[in-house]
Image (tube, rainbow, N blue to C red):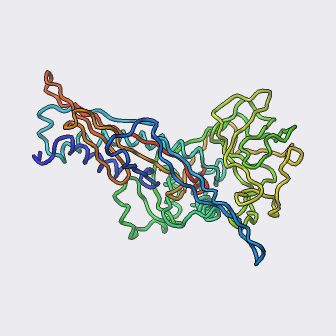
């Protein structure tokens, strides 16, 4: 090995290279590296704060000004997860070139690490996405190559004002196979060379980069998929509501299930004109039991019926009758069939989700502990030695957190 670099420094650099090439999902979303910890190192539980865009109401005509306060809000990411992979080398193995060392040891170890992290993050953020396209029981592309679920997802991103650049699609291999077989003309070689180095990159179509990813989440429905609003008081009907009481259900409800609410339509985020589809909501309760066929369901997005944050309306665009008397007895219908699993592929803009890493502290024996960062990913490598067994011990760690910042800029594509 070269004398100018220590073993651990070379391992750190090579690990970052391998990780970068294998981040099929995390490589396509917002990655925040917080260098404020570069001197002291971050601890589990430290937070990063990110601003949300302001929302305003339009004034029409030359009437008296409608001055609005700057109601700027923020969200935080907690870097609360530390994962790693541990390796050991003997003297003979350390005599290998860095390319051979990477191929035989570093690459498989780092692939396992980033695959586990990516799978956890992808499953979690998907459960925050409430917009969904696709037909229950029909694989996308299986019917004469029909990809309308994907083109509808593209349209839904447009409706929720997601920027038209930096979009990606994550599809499992079976779905990708159906789509490619039925749409060969869409997948001819193109000039999209810049992403060809990343694991899983397939092509660019429908204004998005397409990736093949077996880590997309599968949603298992509960034992019932229909109920109705049951409200005898108005306590849940306030602006910003995220809870509703539902009866007529089976025995369970599960986080991540998507439902539509009779008469509650989506509207344009800016003009507030009604869209032709019902607003979709996602259950945020942890998996729980239903008592006497009734349960309080918590959901996203929060409901706003007036003002700058208005996101629901009637079919004509009018304000909803937002009270127990106006909503009691309305049907709640979940996507799909009871007790069936549905693969939840994704189309999204990069800023729908954020993945953040921070520097871990360097230990006292700093000559044997290094940190390196590249493209929003920070890794620490710590070296120790076992003189009795003539071995070099290495641990590689990542401290990270994630969040679905703008779930409206993502759409599930269900099979």
Out of 398 and 228, give the one closest to the viewer: 398
Quadrant housing residue 393: top left
Q: Name the residue furthest bottom.
A: 62
Q: Residue at x 25, y 47 (%)?
A: 14
Out of 90 and 355, give the one closest to the viewer: 355
Q: Is residue 304 left or right of residue 175?
A: right
Quadrant housing residue 56: bottom right
Q: Residue at x 21, y 44 (%)?
A: 9
Q: Is residue 246 left or right of residue 145?
A: right
Q: Is residue 1 left or right of residue 159?
A: left
Quadrant housing residue 230: top right
Q: Name the residue furthest right.
A: 325
Using the image, determine if residue 401 lies above or below residue 74: above
Can residue 299 be seen from the camera position used here?
yes
Q: Residue at x 29, y 50 (%)?
A: 17
Can residue 147 be seen from the camera position used here?
no
Using the image, determine if residue 153 lies above or below residue 356: below
Out of 282 and 206, give the one closest to the viewer: 282
Residue 31 percent across, percent down from the top left: 43, 52
Residue 118 percent across, percent down from the top left: 44, 44
Out of 316 and 139, give the one closest to the viewer: 316
Using the image, determine if residue 123 lies above or below residue 210: above
Residue 206 percent across, percent down from the top left: 53, 66
Quarter of the image with the N terminus is: top left
Residue 244 percent across, percent down from the top left: 76, 40
Q: How many marks?
A: 0
């Amino acid at each position: 090995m070269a004398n100018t670099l220590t073993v651990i420094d070379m391992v750190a650099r090579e690990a970052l290279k391998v990780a970068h090439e294998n981040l099929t999902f995390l490589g396509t979303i917002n990655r925040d590296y917080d260098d404020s910890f570069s001197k002291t190192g971050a601890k589990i539980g430290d937070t990063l704060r990110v601003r949300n865009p302001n929302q305003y109401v339009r004034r029409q005509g030359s009437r008296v000004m409608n001055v609005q306060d700057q109601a700027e809000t923020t969200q935080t990411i907690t870097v609360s997860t530390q994962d790693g992979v541990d390796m050991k080398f003997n003297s003979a193995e350390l005599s290998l070139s860095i390319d051979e060392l990477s191929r035989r040891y570093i690459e498989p170890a780092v692939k396992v690490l980033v695959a586990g992290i990516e799978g956890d993050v992808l499953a979690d953020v998907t459960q925050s996405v409430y917009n969904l396209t696709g037909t229950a029981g029909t694989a996308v592309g299986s019917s004469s190559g029909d990809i309308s679920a994907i083109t509808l997802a593209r349209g839904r991103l447009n409706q929720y004002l997601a920027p038209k650049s930096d979009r990606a699609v994550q599809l499992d291999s079976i779905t990708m196979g159906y789509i490619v077989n039925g749409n060969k003309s869409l997948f001819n070689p193109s000039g999209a060379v810049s992403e060809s180095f990343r694991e899983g990159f397939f092509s660019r179509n429908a204004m998005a980069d397409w990736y093949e990813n077996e880590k997309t989440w599968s949603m298992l429905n509960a034992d019932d998929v229909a109920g109705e609003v049951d409200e005898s008081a108005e306590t849940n009907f306030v602006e910003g509501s995220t809870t509703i009481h539902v009866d007529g259900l089976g025995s369970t409800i599960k986080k991540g299930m998507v439902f539509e609410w009779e008469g509650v339509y989506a509207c344009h985020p800016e003009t507030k004109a009604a869209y032709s589809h019902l607003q979709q909501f996602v259950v945020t309760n942890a998996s729980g039991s239903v008592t006497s066929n009734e349960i309080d369901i918590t959901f996203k997005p929060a409901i706003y019926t007036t003002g700058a944050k208005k996101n629901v309306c009637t079919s004509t665009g009018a304000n909803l009758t937002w009270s127990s008397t106006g909503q009691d007895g309305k049907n709640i219908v979940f996507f799909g069939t009871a007790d069936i699993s549905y693969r939840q592929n994704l189309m999204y803009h990069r800023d729908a989700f954020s993945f953040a890493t921070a520097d871990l502290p360097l230990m006292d024996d700093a000559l044997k502990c290094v940190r390196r960062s590249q493209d929003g990913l920070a890794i620490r490598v710590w070296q120790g030695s076992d003189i009795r067994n003539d071995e070099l011990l290495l641990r590689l760690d990542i401290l990270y957190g994630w969040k679905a910042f703008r779930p409206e800029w993502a759409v599930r594509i269900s099979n």
